[in-house]
Every structure is written in structure tokens, then in C-alpha cells.
Amino acid sequence: MRTNIVLDDNLVQEAFKYTSIKTKKELITLALKEFVRNHSRLDLRDIKGKIAFRKDYDYKKLRKDEKV
């Protein structure tokens, strides 16, 4: 989709510092992909109270058994 937009030059230059991307088109595409990825993640607060754990589930024991 072709469109014309006015971008904040300082914000664009700052964004270029965090990537090896060289064009504004690639930068905007990356920003849109990250926006969609971040907003499509399941919010953990939405599943509160919807998960049933086994009665013998002991997360503390599992942590003690971990070998780092």
C-alpha cells in the first residue's frame, strides 16, 4: 500500500541506531511487524484463574532440582 506520511526526523534517526536497516521503508516495515507481534501476544492477565494445576504440583521443588 502506497501512502505519504510525515515522520519525526529525530525519532527516525534514533530508530536507525538500533538496527542495520538503511531505508525508511524497511524501518517502517520492521516497526509495524514488531507492533503487531507485541500486540498479538496473549496478555497473562486474561488467563488468570483459567489454569488448573495438579494437586501435587510443586514449583518450588522443581526450582530446587534445576541444575544450572
Image (tube, grey):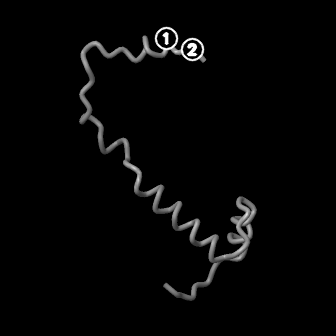
Expressed as whole percent of the image width and height from the top left, the position of residue 66 reads 52, 15
- The answer to whether 38 is drawn above or below residue 65 in the figure is below
Which quadrant of the figure contains the C terminus? top right
Expressed as whole percent of the image width and height from the top left, the position of residue 61 reads 43, 11
Give the tally of numbered discs. 2
Residue pictured at 75% horizontal, 62% vertical: 17
Q: Secondary structure at mark 1?
A: helix
- Amino acid type shown at disc 2: Lys
Disc assigned to residue 65: 1
* Mark 1, other Cα within 10 Å: few <14 / some 14–19 / many ≥20: few
- The answer to whether 32 is drawn above or below residue 7 in the figure is above
Q: Is residue 30 left or right of residue 43?
A: right
**Labels 1 & 2 near each other (Cβ < 8 A):** yes
Residue pictured at 50% horizontal, 62% vertical: 35
Residue pictured at 27% horizontal, 24% vertical: 53
Front position in the image: 1 or 12? 1
